[in-house]
Image: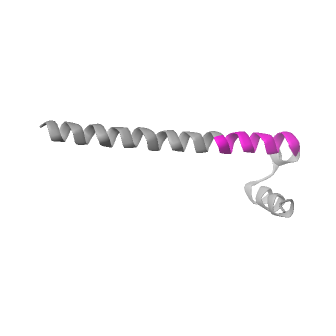
């Protein structure tokens, strides 16, 4: 019983940290997207395909 409980605790801890990493990545992507929109406001009205075309043309 104790081993099962310990195993479950470790699995829960791993899931907690993985979820945190996903939240950090999502936050990073959202803030970068907002920065792009603030600098190039026309990106707000572009379709996804148009946005990627725009990004490809303006990347180094």
Q: Quadrant of the C terminus?
A: bottom right
Give residue 52's quadrant in the image: bottom right
From the viewer's perspective, tell me whether residue 41 is left or right of residue 28: right
When the figure is inspected, residue 59 is found, relative to residue 34, above or below; the finding is below
Left or right of residue 40: residue 8: left
Closer to us: 14 or 35: 14
Q: Is residue 24 left or right of residue 3?
A: right
Residue appearing at x 30%, y 41% in the figure: 10
Residue 53 found in image quarter: bottom right
50 over 28 or under it: above or below: below
- Look at 16% across and 41% down and name the residue there: 3
Nearest the eye: 49 or 30: 30
Residue at 81% over, 63% down? 56
Magenta range: 28-41
What's the magenta bit mostly, secondary-structure-wise? Answer: helix
Q: Is residue 32 covered in magenta?
A: yes
Q: Relative to 6, is 47 above or below? A: below
Which of 33/3 is in front? Answer: 3
Residue drawn at x 31%, y 43% is 11
Question: Residue 59: x, y in percent?
Answer: 83, 60
Residue 39 image position (x, y, % from top left) = 87, 43
Give percent across and percent down for residue 9. 28, 37
Q: Is residue 5 left or right of residue 32?
A: left
């Amino acid at each position: 019983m104790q081993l099962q409980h310990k195993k479950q605790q470790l699995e829960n801890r791993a899931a907690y940290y993985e979820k945190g990493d996903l939240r950090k990545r999502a936050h990073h992507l959202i803030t970068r997207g907002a920065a792009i929109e603030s600098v190039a406001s026309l990106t707000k009205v572009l379709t996804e395909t148009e946005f990627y075309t725009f990004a490809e043309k303006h990347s180094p």
